[in-house]
Amino acid sequence: MYTVQEVAKKLGMTTYSIRYYDDHGLLPFVKRDENNNRLFDEDAVEWVNLVRCFRSTGMPIAEVRHYIDLMLAGDETIPERYQMMLTQQTRAQEQLADKQRQLAKINTKVSHYAKLMNNDAPDDYVPNQMQPDDDQVSVS
């Protein structure tokens, strides 16, 4: 059994996040000791990790709670859970594509600066600097 602090360390999370998830009914398998401290077995730790995955890919808390309710209701809810996972899969794929576009831009800049350093050359790329038109007001 693990404490909140141990789970937080194991998963690289804050204790606040874990308590928040539990307080909002997202960790149905957390047990309590005689002093009402949360205790986590391996299954409960995996649930924390699953909830973190759902949340980090944009699943709202109400939707996570609904998923858990469905899971606890039994196998007749598998089709609805499947649809929820398809939706979440699409969200995650969109986020991944966005991150890949961002990484491509950063990779271009890394390559640009590496070439400049290898050639001991100045950076000749300067974004167009807009000069105020005669009829535009200059703000000082």
Image (cartoon, grey):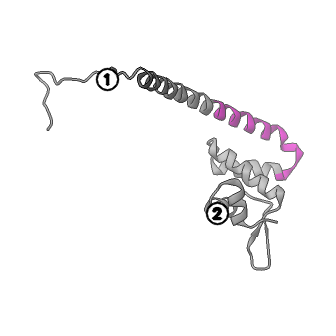
Q: Position of residue 35 (x, y in %)?
A: 75, 79
Q: Are marks 2 and 1 in contact (CB under 8 Å)?
A: no
Q: Look at mark 2 in the image and give the residue it sits on.
A: 15
Query: Closer to the N terminus: mark 2 or mark 1?
Result: 2
Residue 71 placement, left or right of 112: right
How many residues crowd mark 2 within 10 Å: few (<14), some (14–19), many (20+)? some
Q: Position of residue 136 (x, y in %)?
A: 14, 26
Q: Looking at this view, is 26 or 46 the one in front?
A: 46
Q: Position of residue 88 (x, y in %)?
A: 69, 37
SS of the residue under disc 2: helix
The residue sitting at 76% across, 35% down in the picture is 83
Residue 66 visible: no
Q: Amino acid at mark 2?
A: Thr
Residue 93 placement, left or right of 111: right
Q: Looking at this view, is 11 or 34 the one in front?
A: 11
- In this rendering, which labeled residue sits more in front, label 2 or label 1? 1
The residue sitting at 80% across, 60% down in the picture is 29
Asked if residue 47 is positioned above or below residue 84 in the image, the reply reads: below
Q: Look at mark 1 in the image and give the residue it sits on.
A: 127
Q: Which stretch is magenta?
A: 72-93
